[in-house]
Image: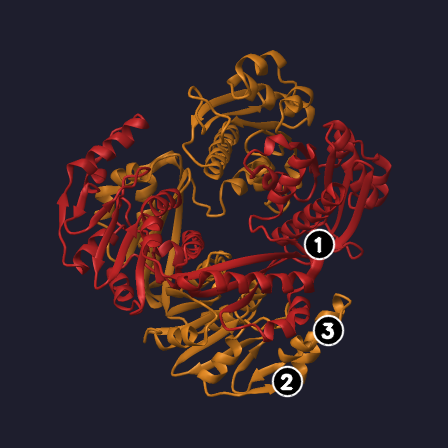
Chain colours: A orange, B red
Amino acid sequence: MKAEIITIGTEILIGQTIDTNSAWLGRVFSDVGIEVQRITTVPDSSKAIVDSLKNIFHDTKWVIITGGLGPTNDDITKKVLTDYFDDELVYRPEIYTHIENLFKKMGKLPNMLNKDQAYFPKSAICLENSLGTAQAMLWERDKKSYISMPGVPFEMKAITNDYILPRMSSVQDILLEHRYFLIQGIPESDLALRLYDWERNLPKQIALAYLPSPGLVKLRLTCKGFLRDTSELLKELDNHSIILRGILGNDIFTEDIRGMEYLVSDLLRKAGETLSTAESFTGGSLSAKLTSVEGASDVFKGSVIAYSNEIKISDLNVDRDELLINGAVTRLVATQMANGIKKKYSSDWSIATTGYTGASSDSDNPSGTVWLAISGPGIEWSKKYFMGPGRERITSKSCLAVLNQLRIFLKAKTR
Amino acid sequence: MKAEIITIGTEILIGQTIDTNSAWLGRVFSDVGIEVQRITTVPDSSKAIVDSLKNIFHDTKWVIITGGLGPTNDDITKKVLTDYFDDELVYRPEIYTHIENLFKKMGKLPNMLNKDQAYFPKSAICLENSLGTAQAMLWERDKKSYISMPGVPFEMKAITNDYILPRMSSVQDILLEHRYFLIQGIPESDLALRLYDWERNLPKQIALAYLPSPGLVKLRLTCKGFLRDTSELLKELDNHSIILRGILGNDIFTEDIRGMEYLVSDLLRKAGETLSTAESFTGGSLSAKLTSVEGASDVFKGSVIAYSNEIKISDLNVDRDELLINGAVTRLVATQMANGIKKKYSSDWSIATTGYTGASSDSDNPSGTVWLAISGPGIEWSKKYFMGPGRERITSKSCLAVLNQLRIFLKAKTR
């Protein structure tokens, strides 16, 4: 069964907001076997919204509309949809009570604009938004379900989880199943060449996609067919997964889509070991990644962000002469940072990063030159990389490279 | 003049990739007065791509297509567009030389899949991609310009800056000008009520939009009209900006769209002062924000990410008994962390964060309870907040709240 997403908001078209809602919806719909066949983003304009509704593909069953339901004047979605469906707004006291209760929790009172939010289209079903003042609307028309939700991400997610996914699952007849294979530090075209023969001969119900991002390629193997053929389809997907693993071997670092920081976290937890980091150019991004994992405090002790040389010397015991003579981006500095933080925070493992990302680089060490180091039980590792251009890109590629190296060490120990 | 963006990539529809390209394009187009009237995201499927091209609005002048130009089998955009425009692919030796040179820089040789990338549609103009192997294509058809670019963000940005924006600017007759007013910590509906009368009476060439995100509302005031009326339009925009400032006063913390970390960075640089941070639950996000500003090392000394209590005690001089008796989320702990890091790193200012974001909370201190502290010359500030649900949301709201408080102190000093 197919869905389309219509995102309403001028702020997205002029680039003031990045549309993360559609990606999230695409992922959870895909998990219940619903294929999003198009995302259309339109401004807060009556004509544009109506145009997009008229344009819906005939084989779309679910029309998911987000945005434009706030209390302010530029939020016109409710009115436009109500007109489009020849409906009318009526006051619903129970919605107003809900809004009042929400404000009460914050120690406030609703204002007149919030009162307008208690008007609701007569023939629509109300999908309660427990976290916000704008309620979601569902219209059934011409065998399609039209759902309009607020664009606030955490409200949109709650409504989707509570009402939309259960409805979708209950009427589904298509199997859509994905497997992921993550590879770090190998270019997309090299992978494609190694997979060339196998990929050419894939049966039509199985498809391969390459999803590259800085330093990482995700391979997605998808099978699609009718739910009644589930067991054969999954067997075929399993068989091709085995072939893929055979071709790429250890270059696949995980099949877990959550990403490298979860993997490292799990391995540390299993080993009962801890980690600390000493960051220079990554400036806290590595720690932020590691602490974004729920329960990080079990394995992550802490970090020193040593952005200045004095801190490298005083806190991490880096050699002052080395910094003066050879600068902050050397093997010795990276190694001393890693050893310094490991000792200081009594962790089992440590990671250090030092590199050039901006204007302070020179011809011998162009921007993108980094040294990464790891220190652990009986292990001292360090390596120089050239990560190419772009401050943000250098940081993400470096975090990924050094976390993958730590993963390899942790994995080797548990074998 | 109007543009549409067509984003090609199944990975976006199933939510494995967030489309950040379209937001960036929307922003830079808007800066040169081009209005993006729709973004359409479609899968890597020939039918879907052709459908989206057939659907282009008649008043769209620029059709900007990104994605699907890589070297692998699932990248079909070049072939589909070549067929759609009745064109044919011919081998261009100069493109192959460019590809060879790119590989040489990385100490590698191109493979046979890269050789295919040197085939280029005969009647298209080549917009050179100096950073990658897939060249951009430009077709002029029926008074529309169709441009197809790779989806790799830094390649796409370079091509846009080098070729597309100059072309757009040279044929433009519409003025589209935005002003921004950023407000921290005040709900959208409260702002809307304060602006109600003024907003209702705005002339039709001036529009106001509310762009809320966790802890922040951006107000965007836009004027639109013909280039020949530029001076009157800008005068009207200026006048309404003055009224808006009059209504909201000091609640507008900046009109600089780059965000809070740039503002704090600038103020510190002007004052010749430095900052350090001690982070618990924010886990490095605050440092990462601060160091994402180019030249951060002039004003940012470093940070201790004190995820464990031992580090709070040993590195930041937090009282062991307080931690034992009252836990890590108290005014005293936040204040001691701020004072500890300021002294340790000899910075003029410091920020500390401590709070509950996950499972470890209790009924007195639900998840979302945080203490934020600032220490500076003659200043010691701390405050308890309740930031609501969501790990990521709590972190961004807290970073914003404490950076804004620091900004207020810095600003007050320079008056």
**Which element type, helix, strand or loop, lies under badge 3?**
helix
Residue under numbered circle 2: A92
**Which element type, helix, strand or loop, lies under badge 1?**
loop
Q: Is residue A31 visible?
A: no
Q: Nearer the viewer, residue B101 or B298?
A: B298
Q: Earlier in the sequence, mark 2 or mark 3?
A: 2
Residue A241 percent coordinates (x, y): 34, 47
Q: Nearer the viewer, residue B312 or A227?
A: B312
**Residue A101 badge:** 3
Residue B329 percent coordinates (x, y): 78, 46
- The image quarter in which residue A343 lies: top right
Q: Is residue A314 visible?
A: yes
Q: Does residue A137 appear to the left or right of A33 in the view shown?
A: right
Residue sitting at x 45%, y 37%? A390
Is mark 1 in CB contact (under 8 Å) with mark 3? Answer: no
**Residue B368 badge:** 1
Co-location on one chain, circles 2 and 1? no
Q: Is residue B160 above or below residue A173?
A: above
Residue B375 percent coordinates (x, y): 78, 38
Q: How far apart in space, not on screen, are marks 2 and 3 (Cα)?
A: 15 Å
Is mark 2 in CB contact (under 8 Å) with mark 3? Answer: no
Q: How far apart in space, not on screen, are marks 1 and 3 (Cα)?
A: 19 Å
Look at label 3 and name its amino acid.
Answer: Asn
Q: Is residue B195 above or below residue B68?
A: below
- Chain letter of mark 2 equals A
Look at label 1 and name its amino acid.
Answer: Gly
- The image quarter in which residue B411 lies: top right
